[in-house]
Image (cartoon, rainbow, N blue to C red):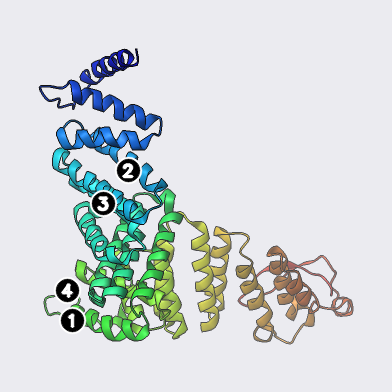
Amino acid sequence: MKKFFLTLLVLFVSFNILAQPGWNWPENKSEAEEKNVLYTDYLKQQNCDEAKIHLDWLIENVPGLHVSIYQNGIKIYRCLIDKEEDPIIKNELINKALILFDGRIENFGREAYVKNRKVTFAYTFYRSDKTQYESLFNMFKDAFLLNGNKIGNSNLVAYMDIVRKHKLTSKSISDDEVLEIYDMISETISFKLSNDAKNEVRYKKYQDNLDKLLTATITVDCNFVENTLGPKLIELTSQPNDEIAQTDYETLTPVDISYSEEIVNLAKKIFQLSITGKCTSSEIALEAAKIMFTNEKDFAVAKFISSRELSTKNYESALEYCDAAIESAGDNNDQKSEMFLRKAQIYQVIGNKVKSRDNARKSISFNSSNSDAYKIIGNLYMASYEDCREGKSRVQDRLVFIAAYNIFKSGGLSNQANQAREQFPSMEEIFNENLEVGESMNTGCWINETVTLNKR
């Protein structure tokens, strides 16, 4: 009876399978049909030991039957591996599973796709086995070569992890090779991010982990960046055939200059490693950032350059890169507000009060809650008392503090507002000049604002 039902089951499943494309049955197909039904049925029951027996027969006798025997085969072997406690037997099962990936490629192609999955599988079980590091390294190298930017996300950081382990245990990988692989993975992450912005947090985490693995693999410090990579960048940008051969880095402005891909990639590497090695204050980091910006107008890079130029009191260049950052901000009002605030701060340092206030006002126009912008204007007014004081009217001279008070209050700066109020004219001074609280008066001077007279 049991055999009868098994026969019926085989016939029923076989009929459905034959109706589907992609099956390559042998002339004497009855045994193959039976084995196919049995292994899939046992797999559904999670009886992986029995499923393996019938699967192995199919792999040996009809390896080109259908791609599903390899897909399901991995499931079966994964099931057996997970429950096996004997390390020797477990390793044998892992090896057989990896052979299944190769068999799938041999019979059904799709080499890049399958090798991508194969190295993920191998890494899962071999990432802590020193004897497998070289093999894993070569598998990753092959998978990346075949897949390029289509490599699976799970293999991005994993590859760098094996690079680290293989280098530390075998010493057979040079620092330059490590950097080349790091660059390749970083570029792949950047490509994926540019095409999948909704997962920005995930890709940034990948890059952070990649940076940590790099510093754990080779010594990345300011000396390495400046003395190893810096001279390479200088050499490349000084080539006689290069469009920018005679460019003085200190005079670079955010204009459209065409750099070769090699120069841009090296600049990106230097900039990223400068961040990783905490040496962004170096000249080579600034030069790299400027090259990067000419290739791609990026807000964060322009902001970095303006900050560096400001730190060295190169105010003109700092202002130019502020403008470049604002242009690169697109529709991001917070970023625009931030950079207009920086311009206001620069003009404040230079001593141009009018332009400082103008830019602070622009900052507020993009973000009305930017208290620092209100503070700048208020402080400008407070500091203008001596410059604007004519000495003819104590009330008139102190109107600047009322103007300061108003702007501090608008920005929610209570402490500063109270300090300004303490400098208001007294009631006695107002009375002595035949004026009244509530009158409208103009501050005059460069401030030139109409305020309502009030007493302290």
Of labels 3 and 4, the one closer to you? 3
Give the answer, above or below, for where 59 lies relative to 364. above
* Residue wearing tag 4: 243
Q: Which mark is residue 95?
A: 3
Density class for disc 1 (Cα within 10 Å; few <14, some 14-19, many ≥20) is some
Q: Nearer the viewer, residue 253 or 295?
A: 295
- The Cα atoms of the two marked residues, 3 and 1, are separated by 52 Å
> Of helix, strand and loop, which one carries label 4?
loop
Q: Are marks 3 and 4 in contact (CB under 8 Å)?
A: no
> Of helix, strand and loop, which one carries label 3?
helix
- Residue 326 visible within the image: yes
Give the answer, above or below, for where 137 lies relative to 240. above
Q: Quadrant of residue 276?
A: bottom left
* Residue wearing tag 2: 77
What kind of residue is marked 4?
A: Glu
**Relative side of 436 to 365, left or right:** right
* Residue wearing tag 1: 238
Which quadrant holds the N terminus?
top left
